[in-house]
Image (cartoon, rainbow, N blue to C red):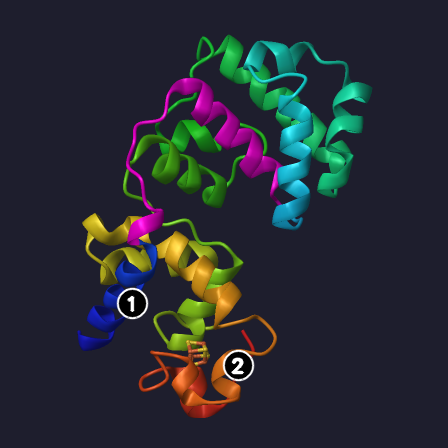
Amino acid sequence: MSEIRTILGFLESRCEKYIHNSNKNNQEIFELMVETILSQRTRDENSSKAADLLFSVARTPKQISELPVKKLQGLIRISGPYRQKTKRIKQASKIILDKYKGKVPSKREELMEIPGIGYKTADIILMYGFNIPSIAVDTHVNTVSKRIGLADRKDDVEEVKEKLEKMFPMNKWYLINLGYVMFGKEVCKPIKPLCIKSAKNCPFSGFCKAYKTKSFEV
Ligand code: SF4
């Protein structure tokens, strides 16, 4: 499919330099997990600040499990629904400590049994933590896929994920989340995609369904 080739070519040209397949150690994967929970329903800059504050005090599953609730709440307050996130991070740390002897599991089913870890967080941990091919469908991946016409507007995120997994070769899955998030922030913006000003602003305007129909709502 020539559209898929065009999309992959664009993503490769934009993302290759950001990809590093270095193997992360368990501590780094655990921190990635905590950061991803903190990033839920908040802006990137807020979750980064919360993660920095938290990791300046506690970093390991044991340290975070032992942190008093009020203290943890105070450290991550900036990350939006901090009470709920405190509960989830505490529970997740405890489960990793007790059930998995401090090691973050690398199976999607096991990850998704941990409080605070849904499909998207699990896929992010698999892809960026363990280098296991996976497509994390966040708001940008969802919007861009539906606008271009790779998924139907009525599809839920699992359906979007399944369709993307069938369309793109597995050895390129690592490009999708990273590439679409960048593309969604810079070009296919949630409110005003840049193609509204000019088709030349987007390399996909020649085949994008939303552009053709001038219907950008997802
Ligand atoms: S043409 Fe517009 S709506 Fe379609 S992918 Fe590009 S920016 Fe998004």
Q: Is residue 179 above or below residue 72?
A: below
Q: Residue 147: image x %, image y %?
A: 44, 76
Examine the rendering and report whether any part of residue 56 can be seen: yes
Q: Nearer the viewer, residue 194 or 135?
A: 194
Image mark for residue 113: none
For disc 2, the marked residue is 216
* The residue carrying mark 2 has its beta carbon less than 8 Å from ligand 1: yes
Left or right? Give the position of 138 relative to 6: right
| Ligand 1 location (quadrant) | bottom left
Q: Nearer the viewer, residue 2 or 157?
A: 2
Q: Is residue 20 above or below residue 188?
A: above
Q: Residue 4: image x %, image y %?
A: 23, 70
Amino acid marked by disc 2: Phe
Q: Please give the name of the residue rendered at 33% of the width and 55% of the height, measured from the top-left corner.
A: 15
The Cα atoms of the two marked residues, 2 and 1, are separated by 21 Å
Q: Is residue 142 above or below residue 67?
A: below
Please provide the residue range marked out in magenta: 16-40
Disc 2 residue crowd, few under 14, some 14–19, many 20+, Cα 10 Å: many
For disc 1, the marked residue is 10
Place residue 167 in its image quadrant: bottom left
